[in-house]
Image (cartoon, rainbow, N blue to C red):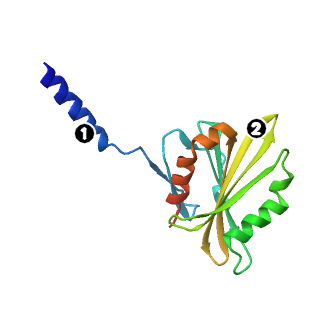
Amino acid sequence: MKHVIAGMLLLLIAGSCFLAPAQDTYTTDQLDYTIELPSPVWRPVSGSDAAHEHAEFVNGERLEGYLQIRKEVVDADTTASNLSRRDMEQKLRFLPGFVEGKEEKFSGRLNGVTVSYEFVRTAKPMMGRIYYLQADNRTVYALRFTGLREKLGRIRNQTDVIARSFKLK
């Protein structure tokens, strides 16, 4: 009996090593990119404006994790880092309770930078994380994640996976 149980445990353990997390590739005919969503909990928001290359996703509920993807056409030779600093100065710093985080280099299928920040929305501590991915010298894609501070912080590995999977068609 012990050998049967031990054998079943060994099969269970060995089998689980080959299981990969479920990932769904997302794109539409209107988008010029694809992304991989790390779990079925991530789903597109109905009413996303794919005609204007805007896509939006939620991780179950909006406060658990919300993603907006925007294509930014920039002046020639504007870097992802330049766009990050411009967004920080012109938009993000005006959010209630804004606390600036540091900018970090990011490597994936497209390289760029990422910046995290904190703010307050309806008296709730929130967090934002933006991945600025450089497609060429005139195009940067911004993957803007927001959610409750403790929730978004816990799914950092998922936001990284989504950003690393970002690929132009």
Residue 72 placement, left or right of 163? right
Residue 114 percent coordinates (x, y):
64, 60
Q: Which residue is drawn at 79% across and 66% down?
A: 86
Q: Can residue 136 be seen in this view?
A: yes
In this view, 161 is above or below 63:
below
Label 2 and label 1: CA atoms lie apart by: 42 Å
Of the image marks 2 and 1, the number of the one nearer the N terminus: 1
Instruction: Say what secondary structure mark 1 lies in.
Output: helix
Residue 14 numbered tag: 1
- Name the residue carrying label 2: 125
Residue 42: quadrant of the picture = top right
The residue drawn where x is 86% and y is 53% is: 94
Judge whether residue 63 can be spotted in this image: no
Report the front residue among 16 and 72. Answer: 16
Please tell me which residue lies in front, 34 or 87: 87
Using the rendered view, name the quadrant where residue 11 is placed.
top left
Residue 124 lies left or right of residue 7; in this view the side is: right
